[in-house]
Image (tube, coloured by chain):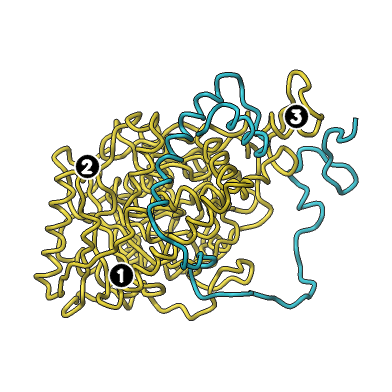
Amino acid sequence: MINTNTVNYIASLARLHLDEGEAGKFARNLEDIIHYVEQLNKLDVKDVKPTSHVLDVENVFRADAVTPSLSNDQALGFAVDRHKGFYKVPKIIE
Amino acid sequence: MNFFDQTAHELLALLKEGKTTSEAIASSFMTRAKVVNAKTNAFIRLPEAAPDSCGVIPLPIGIKDNICIKNALTTCGSRILVGFRPPYDAGVVEKVKDSGGIVLGGLNMDEFAFGSSTETSAYGPVRNPWDQAHVPGGSSGGSAASVAAGQVVWALGSDTGGSVRQPASFCGVVGLKPTYGRVSRYGLVAFGSSLDQIGPLTKDVTDCAMLLNIIAGFDRRDSTSVDRPVPDYTKALVRDVKSLRIGVPREYFIEGIQPAVLKAVRDAIDVLKNAGAVVKEISLPHTQYAVAVYYIVATAEASSNLARFDGVQYGLRVLPDKARKTALVDMYETTRQKGFGDEAKRRIMLGTYVLSSGYYDAYYLRAQKVRTLIKQDFEKAFAQCDAIVCPTSPTTAFRIGEKIADPLAMYLSDIFTIPANLAGIPAVSLPCGFDAQKLPIGLQIMTKAFDEETLLRVAFSYEQATPWHLERAKL
């Protein structure tokens, strides 16, 4: 059962702020969808291996070698705020 | 005939015969794009000027706004990426540029490709060129509508659960989702990384094969890209299905399908039968579970992929009016509240829920197991047949606003396209008729992994025997 408390908890895990009233709407939506996906419980999947890749591909490695890549300046080009080659964020420790 | 009604291969023939120039073609499409965009809203931003081209295929190509073009705005239909200009080209964009393509970005889409109607874009809904009161499908609604409206010669979209094929079906064009790994995902803004593929949207099957030739191939920057030779797909354009085994899955002909869709698809199967194909009924017994599996797997992957949009690396940062938690967490939470629309929030929360402690086994792990069963259904089916034929979507284009308030009803419009993504196999949608309101109907064909050639051969054989691909929307 998904109620507004569950939604507020999930939202905080997902780093989303919800306004008052929004949690109720999302609770109804999510409850409908979760109810729908619970039809999967009808199947016996005890001996079925979960899909981890749709093709028979495993462990793709590359040489551990330096190749040309974006410069620090390019990579930070769209940072909202930056300082001496780093991302800058609001204060973490009060 | 106007340039904007013509296919890429027709325009290339005109160029070869010296009857026109690539500049004249580009300028004609730029004008057309501008003139009809007020009706379609297919472009979030209209291209300002066409870049010059000297390559072998110098034609304007539209790019969905979740595929990175160096130094061009890329929004994913979302406010949260406002102002973002990628510092690099996506793998497919490099390939298109190498072929001489004139790259026009900014094609409208559901926010982060979350939707089946292109109504969740932060930049307004796209309208179907065949009837502007109807949706173009989604999430690549801008790509499909721009091709149908002649705003571009052809376009690229992305397909996670049908987002190329379903809008192709709704807009009366051809849309192909390649085998997972056939086309590089480098520079495609990730939604469901185990499902996403970039695919072509074109006016006919010949163009589809030509554009697949341009974009297919290995890219070491995408670790899921597969290193195997790329055939010349235009060589598969053979009008011959004699003794080819066509499977018709009984689970795809269920109650609730619009009668006109059912009739058009049955007629299409008869066309193939009359051309010499051996048609047999098959079963894909776990079909009914595909949507449920998809909305667990795709949202789980999306919630993780969208964690990067946090007010630090790109675009938007919003601070709260008053402090609630720490300054950093307040910034994250407010930026994401203001930056994402409702459908994005819904999917992020659903994905977070199914991955959260105590629910992972019940939802995510179980869904990945059922995904294995769906994949095995296809393996068994392809032991008995060479291609599977079915409807692309249960209905023709629905009205704008009809399903937006009911997320689950919206999700069910992808019921026939989702299984191919879960199994990683290629699939194409092509026009197979119209309903009484003159809205297009799509036929879906699926083949086994890396057998795009049989896919194109069946599609081409059907297309050449029918007139649907010659019809154009009147705008």
Pointer 1 with pointer 3, Cβ within 8 A? no
Looking at marks 3 and 2 on the same chain, the residue that comes earlier in the sequence is marked by 3
Picture coordinates of residue B211, whole percent (x, y)? 41, 65
The amino acid sitting under disc 1 is Leu
Quarter occupied by residue B116: top left
Chain letter for the part of the structure drawn in cyan: A
> Which residue is rendered at x = 75% and y = 40% of the image?
B312
Looking at marks 1 and 3 on the same chain, the residue that comes earlier in the sequence is marked by 3
| B88 lies above or below A80 | below
Q: Which mark identifies residue B330?
A: 3
> Which residue is rendered at x = 28% and y = 59% of the image?
B444
| Label 3 neighbour load within 10 Å: few <14, some 14-19, many 20+ | many
The amino acid sitting under disc 2 is Leu
Quarter occupied by residue B10: bottom left
> Which residue is rendered at x = 66% and y = 50% of the image?
B86
Q: Which mark identifies residue B439?
A: 2
Residue on which disc 1 sits = B456
**Which-is-in-front pick, marks 3 and 2?**
3
Instruction: Describe residue B62's horizontal placement relative to residue B237 as left or right.
Output: right
The amino acid sitting under disc 3 is Asp
**Which-is-in-front pick, marks 1 and 3?**
3
Q: Callout 3: residue from which chain?
A: B
> Color used for chain B?
yellow
Q: Callout 1: residue from which chain?
A: B
Picture coordinates of residue B189, whole percent (x, y)? 58, 51
